[in-house]
Image (cartoon, rainbow, N blue to C red):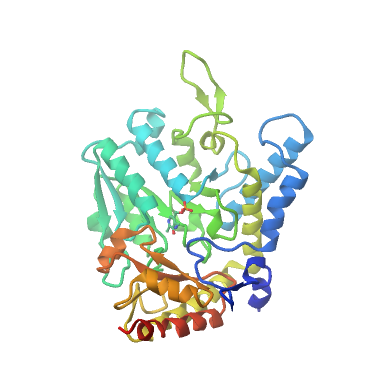
Amino acid sequence: MVDFAAIRAQFPILDQEIHGHPLVYLDSAATSQKPQCVIDAEANFYRTINAGVHRGAHELAARSTMAFEEARAKVARLVGANAEEGQEEVVVTGGATAGLNLLATAFGNASLGRGGAAARRFALKPGDEIVVSKAEHHSVLLPFQELAYRTGATLKWFDLTEDGRIRSDTADEVITERTKVVAVTHVGNTTGAITDIAPIVRRAHEVGAVFILDACQSVPHLKVDFHALDVDFAAWSAHKMYGPTGVGFLYGKRELLEALPPANFGGSMVELAWMDQPAQYMEPPARFEAGTQPVAQVVAAGVAAEWMMSIGLENIEAHERTIAAELLKLGDIDGVRILGPRENVDRIGTVAFDVAGVHPHDVGQFIDAQGIAIRVGHHCAQPVHRHFGLYASNRASSGVYNSVEDAAALIEVVAKVRPFFKV
Ligand code: PMP
């Protein structure tokens, strides 16, 4: 049995009062809090081995390089990716948004003929199709919408069920022989719904399309194995999985990373550079990591990955399912509507809700006054809000440190919202 109360005690930020109440943090979908071991890892790096990686002949540079690559390997282990030297499948990015933009830019470069014959599989032209879903975060929708505008490709999307799940059952119609890229979320950042990606991945591969997974809201809560899921690329952020801000990861099947042209250019990604002929770029992952990397943050993200594995990913998932089941009881309050599936079978982490007649900002302020942190707004996912006939909503989201009591505290306060505003 995992002692989740002891796990909560590892988060110093949670041990404080807000507006005279003990802090209840239910905004982990925006960013998770950090355990002491992650905070220490970043500080220890600066205290002991800080140096640029992959350059410099001195001992500190060697140690920081080793710590950076060990962190990459730990993160790879978390998601079932290859980590052996020469076979790495995890690229360091500035976050999920940066990783998704990297892919869209690289595909755009391939569309201009960059990367040669090997990169042709990523090239788009007028008439080709890019498929996303209506449940996407803007960091998936917008880079691929822009890619469509730049290349003349057509943007298409999966519709949602009434309760906000991606219609995987329509994969055979939505994805056609013209589809070159498919990008969908693993877990909706508003609905909390876990996408049944298997039919989408199968169909994408049947037509030779590249499948990209937004794993931002799945990696922190579920045991995710990219090999088993057979996804081609996946992007996620360290700051939502108990790691630091400013860093994230892009998974790519090794053979695809080897074929993908670079998106960002600069130092540490080039074998040979000349004034009068094209440069020769390094093998992945270095090819995609131009410039000085956020080494301390990557090392700390590696510690976060190890820490999650030490708790056990199945244990984390089971705990979060318990919290989600509790949060879903919000829907029993008069005038409160859950956005997303009501049953607790195919959802995790996030429960967004609407309080009839009360603007989310008023709801959020009322709840904040009781020391409870949730998110209000459109959560960078406007199309899914339109699907529910709303512009904004309230969102409670969990982490390993939350308890059933946290959910109960929120429910007690939300029950008072409509009476307070007299609606
Ligand atoms: N996708 C999803 C599903 C998310 O929840 C988020 C973060 N809100 C992102 C992408 C973007 O992540 P980041 O802002 O860390 O780049």
Residue ID at (31%, 53%): 132
Can residue 167 be seen at all in this image of the molecule?
Answer: no
- Location of ligand 1 given as a quarter of the image: bottom left
Left or right: residue 222 compared with residue 2 = left
Q: Residue 286 at what x, y percent from top left?
A: 56, 35
Left or right: residue 263 compared with residue 273 = left
Q: Residue 312 at what x, y percent from top left?
A: 62, 68
Which residue occupies the foreground of this view, 104 or 232? Answer: 104
> On screen, 94 above or below 341?
above
Which residue occupies the foreground of this view, 383 or 68? Answer: 383
- Residue 180: image quadrant is top left
Which residue occupies the foreground of this view, 389 or 185? Answer: 389
Residue ID at (33%, 76%): 358
Say which quadrant the C terminus sits in. bottom left
Can residue 257 be seen at all in this image of the molecule?
Answer: yes
> On screen, 253 above or below 406?
above
> On screen, 150 above or below 74?
above
Residue ID at (76%, 47%): 47
Left or right: residue 52 compared with residue 125 = right
Q: Residue 154 at what x, y percent from top left?
A: 23, 44
Residue ID at (74%, 50%): 44
Say which quadrant the N terminus sits in. bottom right
How many labels, in total?
0
Q: Residue 367 at what x, y percent from top left?
A: 46, 76
